[in-house]
């Protein structure tokens, strides 16, 4: 892979390495959308790396669609993005790809109703007292699948995976050691008065879906006491034994839960030592057996789960943490993106870097993508375990 050395020659999507940086490489994936968010990476069995995300004028708008860019095996340039989804009656969000092998892919994403107007128009109505509720209407969402048989160059429509209103996904499907497919998900819930109290979607709760027939049918299994614990990230530690990590709507800590029966039953989630700012996380079990977790390492906003919190402009200090004991402890933490580092009265000047995705490529390198620079684009960096440990 030929990497550009001089930043002044960077083109959109081109991998480069700054002299003062310890990253192996980094890139800004090109986009024409005003708002770009919730990227997810996948390496296919042919070696290509795909990045999918949602882009449009604003989260929740009808022009927000799923986009895909490709880093071909051995290439140093991300391809120009392609728009994949096309239902303009819905805001289509939170995509990920599952690779069945041999070019057969699922692109899984959410689709929710829209307000039929811009975010600015809706906010003006709310401010005037003529309307109420969240612009994003997540409580109307369903999970959909687009299918490809040519490594993601073309997709065709498929029936929804889950039609129950409010169904939301974020973390990719995993295949368990017994052959089952498992996907963590949650339901977005609107409770009376939540919007007025600033506690929108505080009733959200998690479940997992399991398929014993390679995705033909799915059965739902609840996660007990999971209200406020979302973006469920399951990881199989050993045969049948799983840990799941969760974002917290209460902006207190990242939570964890365990299953000993291939995801059929779960313990009630309990807090880890890592902070949560009510923003997305993602984690993967590496070839070494360690767990790498990417998240926003912001200062502790709260140490209790007494109320829903949406802390403005806290989505910075994007970090990766490494666990060598199955998620019990995370002794190694390193910041990938510092952001502007404003605090105090300047807090609101921080631009967003959030919603990370992480994969381990065939060569052992770790690839991380994330929302960058206030949702202006998706950024991609390449690191490894030694970089996290400072070795």
Image (cartoon, rainbow, N blue to C red):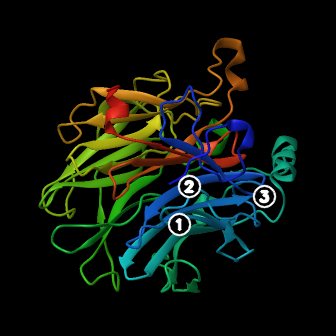
Q: Height in image: 259 above or below 299?
A: below
**Residue 41 appears left or right of 273:** right
The Cα–Cα distance between marks 1 and 3, rounded to whole angstroms, is 21 Å
User: Mark 3 and mark 1 in contact (Cβ < 8 Å)?
Assistant: no
| Residue drawn where x is 50% and y is 84% of the image | 150
Which numbered marker is on residue 72? 1
Q: Quadrant of the C terminus?
A: top left
N-terminal of the pair, mark 1 or mark 3, is 3
Q: Nearer the viewer, mark 1 or mark 2?
A: 1
SS state under label 2: strand
Give percent across and percent down for residue 349. 73, 25
Give percent across and percent down for residue 300. 46, 22
Determine which residue is flagged by label 3.
32
Graded by Cα atoms within 10 Å as few (under 14), some (14 to 19) or many (20 or more), the crowding at tag 2 reads many
Q: Height in image: 204 above or below 157?
A: above
Determine which residue is flagged by label 2.
39
Graded by Cα atoms within 10 Å as few (under 14), some (14 to 19) or many (20 or more), the crowding at tag 1 reads some
The Cα–Cα distance between marks 3 and 2, rounded to whole angstroms, is 15 Å
Give percent across and percent down for residue 188. 52, 57
The Cα–Cα distance between marks 1 and 2, rounded to whole angstroms, is 17 Å
Q: Height in image: 73 above or below 335?
A: below
- Residue 95 falls in image quadrant: bottom right
Residue at the top extreme, as displayed: 344
N-terminal of the pair, mark 1 or mark 2, is 2
Residue 189 makes an appearance in the image: no
**Relative to the observer, which residue lies in front, 112 or 314?**
314
N-terminal of the pair, mark 3 or mark 2, is 3
Q: Height in image: 214 above or below 304?
A: below
User: Mark 2 and mark 1 in contact (Cβ < 8 Å)?
Assistant: no
Residue 344 makes an appearance in the image: yes
| Residue drawn where x is 62% and y is 20% of the image | 341
């Amino acid at each position: 892979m030929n990497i550009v050395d001089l930043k002044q020659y960077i083109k959109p999507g081109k991998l480069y390495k700054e002299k003062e940086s310890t990253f192996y490489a980094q890139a800004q994936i090109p986009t024409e959308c005003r708002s770009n968010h919730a990227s997810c990476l996948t390496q296919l069995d042919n070696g290509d790396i795909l990045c999918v995300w949602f882009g449009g004028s604003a989260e929740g708008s009808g022009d927000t669609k799923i986009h895909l860019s490709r880093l071909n095996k051995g290439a140093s340039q991300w391809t120009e993005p392609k728009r994949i989804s096309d239902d303009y009656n819905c805001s289509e969000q939170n995509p990920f790809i599952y690779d069945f092998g041999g070019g057969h892919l699922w692109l899984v994403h959410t689709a929710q109703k829209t307000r039929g107007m811009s975010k600015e128009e809706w906010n003006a109505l709310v401010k005037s007292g003529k309307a109420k509720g969240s612009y994003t209407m997540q409580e109307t969402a369903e999970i959909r699948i687009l299918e490809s048989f040519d490594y993601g160059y073309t997709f065709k429509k498929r029936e929804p995976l889950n039609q129950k209103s409010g169904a939301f996904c974020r973390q990719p499907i995993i295949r368990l050691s017994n052959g089952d497919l498992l996907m963590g998900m949650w339901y977005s819930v609107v409770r009376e008065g939540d919007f007025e109290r600033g506690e929108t979607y505080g009733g959200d709760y998690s479940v997992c879906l399991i398929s014993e027939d390679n995705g033909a049918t799915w059965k739902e299994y609840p996660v007990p006491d999971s209200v406020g614990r979302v973006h469920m990230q399951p990881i199989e530690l050993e045969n049948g034994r799983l840990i799941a990590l969760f974002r917290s709507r209460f902006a207190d800590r990242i939570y964890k839960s365990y299953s000993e029966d291939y995801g059929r039953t779960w313990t009630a989630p309990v807090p880890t030592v890592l902070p949560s700012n009510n923003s997305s996380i993602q984690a993967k079990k590496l070839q070494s057996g360690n767990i790498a977790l990417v998240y926003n390492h912001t200062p502790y906003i709260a140490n209790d789960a007494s109320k829903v919190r949406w802390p403005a402009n806290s989505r910075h200090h994007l970090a990766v943490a490494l666990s060598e004991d199955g998620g019990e402890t995370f002794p190694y933490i390193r910041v990938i993106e510092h952001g502007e580092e404003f605090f105090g009265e300047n807090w609101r000047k921080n631009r967003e870097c959030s919603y990370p995705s992480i994969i381990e490529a065939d060569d052992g390198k770790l690839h991380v993508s994330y929302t960058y620079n206030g949702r202006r684009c998706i950024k991609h960096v390449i690191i490894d375990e030694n970089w996290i440990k400072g070795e």
